[in-house]
Image (cartoon, rainbow, N blue to C red):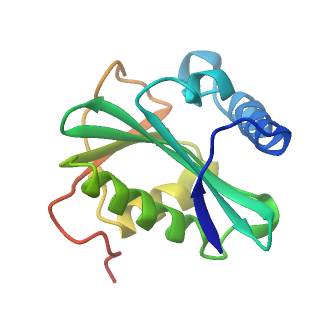
Amino acid sequence: MQIARDDLSGPEIAGFLDEHVRQMRSISPPESKHALDLDALRAPGITFWTVRDHDVLVGCGALKELDAGHAELKSMRTTAARKRSGIASLLLEHIITEAARAGFTRLSLETGTAEFFLPARRLYEKFGFVPCEPFADYRPDPNSTFMTRRLWTAPTPRS
């Protein structure tokens, strides 16, 4: 597996992210859809990574700077064929490490409350994320779960 920064210029990642946004729209009501499209992911303050296995795109994730000490995890996605194969854990550990290296002391995220998002919520819990209040521009939403973790500890999952 190779994790690398991606400049979001290739057609493969464009298609991958378009599929992600379409899937989130099919699951979440429009007012609760917070997935970023390709243009939004190109904004300043966002670092985007892809995961490849023998040159095959199998996952992606991003880090969005909220302020000097706080960042948000965005666009975590694994291809359907590779779900529950360890790719998300590998990528999440990478992003947590990079966030800490960049000087962030807190990393937060928003994910859905629907059953579809249960594996994601469990993954985040395994990596030390705990429920929190809405952050940044988010508002309370029955379709959203907000989670956060401090980054002064090692980014390894709990048993």
Q: Quadrant of the C terminus?
A: bottom left
Residue at screen point 50% across, 31% down: 143
Relative to 51, residue 137 above or below: above
Q: Nearer the viewer, residue 39 or 24?
A: 39
Extreme-bottom residue of the structure: 159
Q: For residue 79, which quarter of the picture?
A: bottom right
Residue at screen point 27% across, 57% down: 101
Relative to 36, residue 128 above or below: below
Q: Quadrant of the N terminus?
A: bottom right
Residue at screen point 25% across, 41% down: 132
Residue at screen point 28% across, 28% down: 135
User: Looking at the image, can residue 21 be seen?
Assistant: yes
Q: Nearer the viewer, residue 78 or 55?
A: 55
User: Looking at the image, can residue 112 be seen?
Assistant: no
Residue 140 % position (x, y)? 35, 23
> What is the total number of numbered labels drawn onto the structure image?
0
Q: Nearer the viewer, residue 116 or 39?
A: 39
Relative to 78, residue 83 above or below: below
Q: Name the side, left or right, on which 129 lies relative to 114.
A: left
Q: For residue 80, which quarter of the picture?
A: bottom right
Q: Name the side, left or right, on which 148 lies relative to 20.
A: left
Residue 23 % position (x, y)? 75, 37
Residue 18 % position (x, y)? 78, 33
Residue 113 % position (x, y)? 50, 42
Q: Nearer the viewer, residue 71 or 42?
A: 42
